[in-house]
Image (spheres, grey):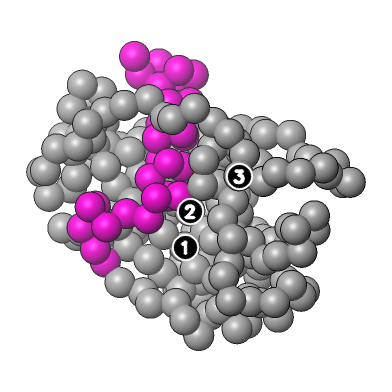
């Protein structure tokens, strides 16, 4: 992959998908779904401008929600999120840049009585030369990649909105180089880029 500052990273398929959770479940697991969207261009251009020479940027959820794709992340969804990370990485063989959008949504792991973050990433491709967004973007709901669900340490098992309110005080909003990408976001990027390649004509 190649970052927006021109430094190359290796294009690779995602790691074998596997769940982080273990143990018996007494509630249904939602099925993984993909949803194509076409109202993403405004958000893509805004994030591209905000990134500048950075490879990733983290927003507090209020700033993130100011101009985001409403069909993908409605207000009811974002009310359970503390922040969002956007990352941009390119792949020279594909001649495309891949932008992944990852809001961090708070959830409860009932079997382990812990609070967790879940990611439902959106992938947007951009032409590597013109940086024009592709006509179609895709969000992946309830996916099964390593790091999609991660524990929130130091917070008692309680209701979602109490945890969201407390966590917001610890969120740092900043732009950083692609080398600083959080592991769950990186894995979400590869997972969704693989899906886009296979289903939308990028070999």
For the record, the magenta segment spans 175-203
Which residue: 78% across, 40% down? 29
Indicate the quadrant containing the C terminus: top left, top right, bottom left or bottom right. top left
Report the residue marked by disc 2.
102
Which element carries disc 3, helix, strand or loop?
A: loop
Residue 70: x and y in percent read 59, 55
SS of the residue under disc 2: strand
What secondary structure is the stretch in magenta mostly built from? helix
Q: Quadrant of residue 135?
A: top left
Q: CA distance from mark 2 to mark 3?
A: 18 Å
In this orientation, which residue lies closer to the viewer: 111 or 134?
A: 111
In the foreground, 151 or 86: 151
Given contact means CB atoms under 8 Å apart, are the residues at marks 1 and 2 in contact?
A: yes
State the CA–CA distance, disc 3 to disc 1: 21 Å
Q: Earlier in the sequence, mark 2 or mark 3?
A: 3
Residue matched to label 3: 20
> Mark 3 or mark 1, which has the lower sequence index?
3
Q: Residue at x 63, y 61 (%)?
A: 116
Residue shown at 38% from the left, 25% from the top: 13
Residue at position x 24%, y 52% in the image: 178
Q: Which residue is mark 1?
A: 84
Extreme left residue here?
6
**Mark 2 neighbour density, 10 Å: few (under 14) some (14–19) many (20 or more):** many
């Amino acid at each position: 992959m190649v970052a927006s500052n021109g430094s190359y990273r290796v294009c690779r398929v995602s790691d074998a998908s596997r769940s982080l959770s273990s143990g018996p479940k007494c509630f249904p697991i939602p099925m993984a779904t993909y949803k194509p969207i076409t109202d993403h261009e405004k958000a893509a251009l805004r994030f591209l401008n905000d990134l500048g020479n950075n490879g990733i940027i983290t927003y507090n959820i209020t700033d993130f929600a100011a101009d985001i794709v409403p069909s993908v992340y409605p207000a009811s969804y974002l009310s359970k999120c503390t922040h969002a990370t956007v990352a941009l990485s390119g792949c020279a063989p594909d001649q495309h840049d891949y932008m992944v959008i990852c809001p961090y949504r708070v959830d409860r792991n009932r079997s382990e009585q812990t609070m967790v973050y879940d990611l439902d990433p959106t992938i947007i491709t951009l032409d590597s030369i013109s940086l024009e967004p592709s006509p179609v973007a895709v969000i992946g709901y309830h996916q099964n990649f390593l790091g999609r669900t991660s524990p929130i340490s130091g917070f008692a098992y309680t209701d979602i909105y109490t945890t969201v309110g407390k966590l917001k005080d610890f969120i740092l909003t900043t732009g950083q180089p692609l080398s600083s990408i959080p592991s769950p976001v990186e894995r979400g990027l590869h997972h969704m880029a693989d899906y886009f390649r296979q289903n939308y004509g990028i070999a």
